[in-house]
Image (cartoon, rainbow, N blue to C red):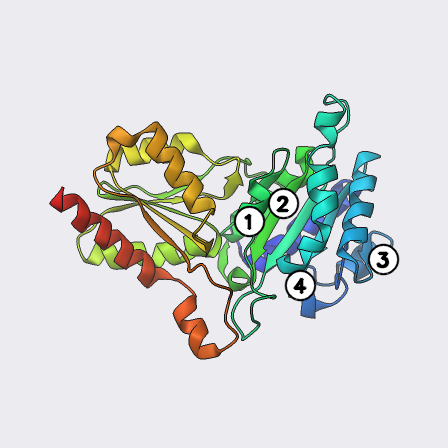
Amino acid sequence: MRELTYAQAIREAHAQLLAEDPRVFLIGQGVWNPWYAGTSLQDLDKEFGRDRIIDSPVSENATTGAAIGAAITGMRPIVFHPRMDFMLLAADPIINQAANWSYLFAGQVSVPVVIRAVINRRGEQGAQHSQALQALFAHVPGLKVVMPATPHDAKGLLIAAVRDGNPVLYIDDRWLYDLPGAVPDALYEVPIGSAALRRSGRDVTVVATSYMAAEAVKAVATLAQRGIDVELIDLRSIKPWDHNLVYSSVGKTGRLVIADAAWMSGGIAAEIAASVASEIFHALKAPIGRVCLPDVPAPTSALLEQAYYIGAEDIVSTVEKVLVSSSRS
């Protein structure tokens, strides 16, 4: 099987979906410009024409509303938001319209729209250009939210999202764009709501999302050298998320660390921790550990960014603290 980067896998998924289904089209800011999307949309306008690859004005609300309207009439649009921060300007059509439409009409009408939101980080971009807002949208009934962490899943989850028939937020992180991995040539789906068991282990369960799943792979290798056997779960889908796999793993290891590169308060890690504590508290041998961003806006200073952002070393230290805590209990 050949290798593609994460960004190339996203590009291939777009191209194959566009070729397969005439209802699919792409709309958003900068879709003709690699500065906005890297190689993830490269030359799609040349391959499929600019009537299906539509570079929109700078109006997130209008662009997203137009796509949702097209989805209601039977199209399969993908809306591209090159910065998740500015997708907040489209919160009204996403939350009030797309998420509720099927419910309001007793399931007789669906909204098969994919809203692709890109997380940008570091590079002294500051508080308004660096936000990871997945928990905000995962809070809303009627929306599905996926966050692929590998090239294989980046392609398979986008295909699954477009075919799903419901509004799906597809969130990718620019820090993953150069990550290589094996990707099949054919169209294939990664099931929404199904996590991936990346490594079996007996001492502690680590559940990670997006680029923190990639960082967790590094952390697991370091911990293995220290004699700590980690079971690693890449969540992949955060709404719905895979309760069964997480509960089964924690039931085996008795310890849980959750890594999500967003703010700690009210985040995905908090949701998983609360669910585990309420459903299988008896299985826990130690308090649950969370590896998240501090509850402050992203700094602009490069020096402060080094302290602000989290990575493999933070997972390692949190796992070790959880193990120490359980040995004392």
| Residue positioned 22% across, 54% down in the render | 320
Q: Residues within 10 Å of mark 1 (few under 14, many from 20)?
A: many
> Which residue corresponds to mark 2?
169
Q: Quadrant of residue 74?
A: top right
Q: Amino acid at mark 1?
A: Gln
Q: Indicate which label's residue lies in the foreground, 2 or 1.
A: 1
Mark 3 vs mark 1: in front: 1
- The answer to which image quadrant residue 88 occupies is bottom right
State the CA–CA distance, disc 2 to disc 1: 9 Å
Q: Earlier in the sequence, mark 1 or mark 4?
A: 4
Q: Which mark is residue 11?
A: none
Taking the image as drawn, is residue 108 in sight? Answer: yes
Specify the label residue 37 is tagged with.
4
> Could you say which disc has been placed on residue 50 in the image?
3
SS state under label 1: helix
Side of 170 where 202 appears, left or right: left
Residue assigned mark 1:
134
User: Contact, CB < 8 Å: mark 2 with mark 1?
Assistant: yes
Name the spot of residue 89 as percent of width and height, x first: 71, 55
Q: Residue at x 68, y 70 (%)?
A: 35
Query: 10 Å neighbourhood of mark 2: few (<14), some, or many (≥20)?
Result: many
